[in-house]
Each structure stands twice: as structure tokens, then as C-alpha cells.
Amino acid sequence: MLTPELVTLLTDPVLIAILVVALLVVGGAAGIVVTRRRRSALPQADQPAPLETAEPQVGDDAETPRDTPTRTVEDTELPEQAPTVEKPESAQGRLVRLRARLARSQGSLGKGLLALLSRDKLDEEAWEDIETTLITADVGVAPTQELVEKLRTRMRVEGVGAAQARDILREELIALVDPSMDRTLAVTRKDTQPAVVLVVGVNGTGKTTTVGRLARVLVAEDKHVVLGAADTFRAAAADQLQTWGERVGARTVRGPEGGDPASIAFDAVKQGIAEEADVVLIDTAGRLHTKTGLMDELGKVKRVIEKSAEVDEVLLVIDATTGQNGLTQARVFADVINVTGLVLTKLDGTAKGGIVIAVQRELGVPVKLVGLGEGADDLAPFDSEQFVDALLD
């Protein structure tokens, strides 16, 4: 039974508030205890791992830690793709293909001569036409007069007709081209050093392309080749030569634009010696034959190279389309540096194949290589008989 005093206490607002607060505190503590007991009762596998050691699960966001530095495209190292090394065409395959091209492009000279020699009557007018045809084809005045005199004598003495005219013309043209000249390239490695080939010529004759093509010819013969980019005056020359080298696996030694050509040539030879290369090909800057200072620089390049190795070949590159102007260039280069061989480029772009005869007669130096067309393998050793046969085919 509630007494009046107890009722008074139960209805006191202050006391009621104290009781409510006490009940809330006791209930919260009891809930925490229950929760801890439930968590401890869970299986070990179901408990989440601590934050610092947790592994990401499927569906979790993959976020880069904020203390990890970011990398730009420039900082990222991509795997380098090895350049594809080509297998150049063999020399024999080039000769067959180039002879066909030469026959198509030079046929007008041979056809013109055969048409004149096949006339029923070879009078003075006919022989004058023959002389004109030869001179127009850049054979040169002296060689033309020599050839015409031999043709007149043989056809008169032997009494041959049109059928035999071709054979006589072929024999005399071959003799004029002079098959006795040594046309082999000095590209054989010596005991302690590689063969060194220096390539020279005026602007625009195709020296750098010739060096690249010659490298392909030598690589096809299983020779180890090093290229020297000594043309430092033309911005793209070193890049062009390096591209040629990379295509066949040949190293290119180069220097700064506008640098000393003699120094680069010397470094290329040193590299060739270090690698025990078979051949070092040196590309030089094109220079006008009228510029004395530039011409004298060629002599310096050669002298600097010879401090460490002998220069075995000096190849003069001549544009066959320049005709008699090419002869003038050749004379000046021959006076400045000892030219050992000639390279005739763009021979397919002209019917004036007689430049072969004229330049050899002028310098006493053999044509060793000819270039036809724009292809990478459009360079081949010169062959007297095949050249004449191409003219007459």
C-alpha cells in the first residue's frame, strides 16, 4: 500500500527526471555490452580486416593513394620496337633488272646508229649523221671521230651489209668503253683496318643516296659496314644516311649540324676499326666545283682520315643528265683529290649514255657503278658489255 509520503515522492517532477536519466544510462551500457558479445561471437572469417591491411575485393573502388606521384606520358618508358632489317637484293639480280631499264631508256642511241648503218648506201651525209648522233649522246668529239673512222674502215674493207653492221658497231662500242679497265671496288678489309671509301661530288648528284645504296650492295655480300655522315651542311643529310643504315643494320657515325666534316670522318674510321668492320663509307657535302675553299676542304678530309687509315677508294658521283657539264666538274675534282672511280646516277633519265665513254676518256678513271631509277636497290656494278648490249637492244 502506497503511503501519502511515497505518493508525494513519485509525483515529484524532479525525482521523475532523475529516474529517466538513470534508466537511459543503464540501457545504453547494456546495449554496448550486448553488441560486443555478439561481435566476439561472429566467426573469424566474417570479421573485416583492419583498414591498413585490407585487400580490395570485387566491387571495391580502386583509388590511387594520394601520396603516390603521378606519371606523365613523357615519364612512361615504352618498350622499344626493334627496327626491321632488310635483306638487300643480290648484285646479279640488280644487273639483270638494271640492264632491262637501261635498254628501255637508252635505246634511242643504239636504234639511231643501227638505222643509219643499215642504209643501202653510206655516203658522206650518212656518216655525218652518225657523228651528230654520237656527239648528241655526249660521247664527245674525239671518241666520236675515233669510232666513226673505225666503222668506216671496217665496213668498207670487210664489205659487210646491214645484218653485220650491228655486230661491228657492238664490237667498236665495247672497245671504246674499254673493258680492260679495272672496275672492282677496293672494299676488302686489311689486316688491322677496314677499307675506307670516300664519296664526293657536286650538289644534287645523289651522293647520300649512292652511299646508302652502296651500303646495301656491300651488306648483300655479307660485309660489316659503318657509315660516316660527314655532310654537315645539309640539315637532313645525316638523318637520311642514318635511315639508310638502319634499314640494313649498319651503324651511322654523325656529329652536330655545321660541325667539322674531317672530324666526323675521322670518328667514323675509328668506329670502324673498333668494330672490326669490313668497310667504312664516308658521305661528304656537295660542293660546287667553282668554290675553291670547299674543294680544298676535301683534301683536308682525306688527310685527316689517313692519320688512322688509308683511303682505298674516292668515288666521284656524276649526274648523267648534266652531259658535258659533268665533264667539267670531273676535271676539277680530279685535280683536287685522287679520284679512283666514277658513279653515274640517273642514267635512266637520259638517252645520252655516251657520257660513260666521254668521262672515262677524259679522266682515265673507270665507271664502277651506275644508278637507275628511284628504288633502294637501283645501283649496280658497271659492266662494259652489258652496257653496250643495253644500248643496242
Image: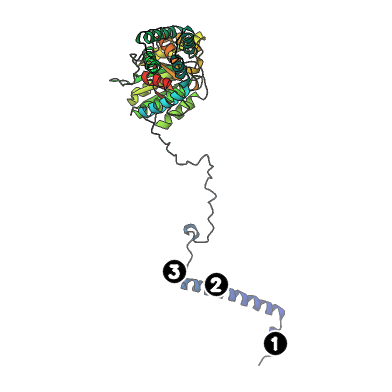
Mark 1 — residue? Answer: 7
Q: Nearer the viewer, mark 3 or mark 2?
A: 3
Q: Residue at x 55, y 72 (%)?
A: 32
Q: Amino acid at mark 3?
A: Gln
Task: Name the spot of residue 318 as percent of width and height, x first.
Answer: 46, 16
Among the two numbered marks 1 and 2 on one chain, the one whose residue lies closer to the N terminus? 1
Label 3 with label 2: CB-CB less than 8 Å: no
Among the two numbered marks 3 and 2 on one chain, the one whose residue lies closer to the N terminus? 2
* Disc 1 element: helix
The residue lying toward the viewer, choosing from 277 and 79, is 277
Task: Name the spot of residue 168 as percent of width and height, x first.
Answer: 37, 14
Q: CA–CA distance between discs 1 and 3?
A: 54 Å
The residue lying toward the viewer, choosing from 314 and 108, is 108
Q: Amino acid at mark 2?
A: Ile
Q: CA–CA distance between discs 3 and 2?
A: 20 Å
* Disc 2 element: helix
* Disc 3 element: helix
Mark 3 — residue? Answer: 44
Above or below, 130 against 81 in this view is above
The residue lying toward the viewer, choosing from 137 and 319, is 137
Label of residue 32 in the image: 2
User: Where, by quadrant of the figure, is residue 25 drawn?
Assistant: bottom right
Among the two numbered marks 1 and 3 on one chain, the one whose residue lies closer to the N terminus? 1
